[in-house]
Image: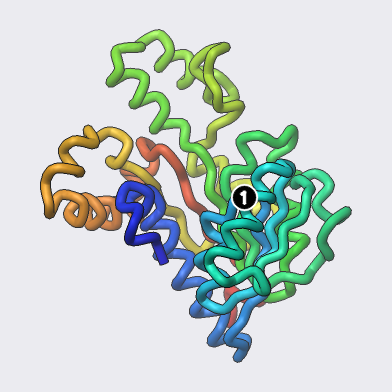
């Protein structure tokens, strides 16, 4: 599902796509429907929505940015999937001003919790958009990855600040409003009534490896992809991942 023309992009999203693809396949099998209804909150220009639509699913993208939605419209037209992707302006707080409750088989909440005022409310709203048998794909910035990156760059005071800050920020110049540990994200998902199906570390190594090593060595990208996949499920590496991915399932979906 990743874009073969964007190898560096695929390196950063391959683990999420693999987990999401498996969840979609299981939902298709359980529902008996080839086309699922997917809600992509904060979906922007369609990095996930367009590949999902290419698979035949119907995707509603909710994003607060008119520019992102304009780019989404252009991108879906170029990909020939405009009939399967709908973009609406909105955010996680006012989600049900623009979409219906309980109307989706799968909800993507990627890169949203870092920016909302109340992450718990954001997760509850995402869960409320699911059908009785549904799956939540949650992707958020990891605390450990930021601490490690600042330390390796020689910014030791900032690394310690991020480690001690309640929101995981390394200082006033930090562009990320909030970061999470795997434990915090799983607690949010479980607190909203879902069963945690899987937790993966994303970009464990990708952001630390110099680009020149990947771009100049023909086999390096594939080897790094395999390394990321091997480490993603191991709890020991969750604490140093740049992002964390949690797959949550409604009780009905978990039993299916």
Q: Residue at x 55, y 19 (%)?
A: 165
Q: Is residue 107 visible?
A: yes
- Left/right placement of residue 176 relative to residue 88 reads left
Mark 1: few/some/many CA within 10 Å (<14, 14-19, 20+): some
Spot occupied by residue 128 in the image (x, y as percentages of width and height): 77, 61
Which quadrant of the rendered structure holds the N terminus? bottom left
- Left/right placement of residue 17 relative to residue 188 reads left
Q: Residue at x 51, y 76 (%)?
A: 55
Spot occupied by residue 191 in the image (x, y as percentages of width and height): 68, 51
Q: Residue at x 83, y 65 (%)?
A: 100
Could you say which is closer to the camera, residue 162 or residue 68? 68
Q: Residue furthest bottom?
A: 32
Which quadrant of the rendered structure holds the C terminus? bottom right
Q: Which residue is mark 1?
A: 71
Say which element carries label 1. Answer: helix
Q: Is residue 251 visible?
A: no
Q: Residue at x 15, y 49 (%)?
A: 220
The image quarter in which residue 252 lies: bottom right
Could you say which is closer to the camera, residue 78 or residue 196? 78
The image quarter in which residue 130 lies: bottom right
């Amino acid at each position: 599902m990743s874009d073969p023309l964007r190898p560096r992009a695929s390196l950063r999203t391959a683990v999420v796509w693999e987990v999401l693809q498996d969840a979609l396949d299981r939902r298709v099998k359980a529902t008996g429907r080839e086309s699922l209804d997917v809600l992509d909150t904060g979906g922007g220009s369609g990095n996930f929505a367009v590949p999902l639509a290419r698979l035949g699913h119907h995707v509603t993208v909710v994003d607060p940015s008119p520019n992102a939605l304009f780019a989404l419209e252009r991108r879906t037209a170029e990909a020939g999937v405009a009939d399967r992707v709908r973009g609406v302006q909105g955010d996680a707080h006012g989600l049900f001003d623009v979409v219906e409750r309980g109307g989706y088989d799968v909800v993507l909440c990627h890169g949203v919790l870092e920016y909302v005022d109340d992450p718990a409310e954001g997760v509850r709203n995402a869960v409320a958009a699911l059908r009785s048998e549904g799956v939540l794909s949650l992707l958020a910035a990891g605390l450990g990855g930021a601490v490690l990156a600042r330390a390796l760059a020689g910014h030791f005071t900032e690394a310690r600040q991020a480690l001690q800050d309640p929101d995981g920020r390394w200082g006033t110049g930090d562009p990320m409003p909030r970061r999470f540990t795997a434990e915090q994200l799983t607690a949010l998902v479980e607190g909203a009534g879902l069963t945690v199906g899987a937790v993966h570390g994303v970009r464990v190594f990708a952001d630390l490896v110099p680009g020149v090593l990947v771009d100049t060595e023909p086999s390096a990208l594939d080897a790094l992809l395999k390394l990321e996949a091997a480490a993603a499920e191991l709890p020991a590496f969750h604490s140093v991942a740049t992002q964390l991915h949690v797959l949550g399932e409604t009780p009905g979906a978990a039993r299916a």
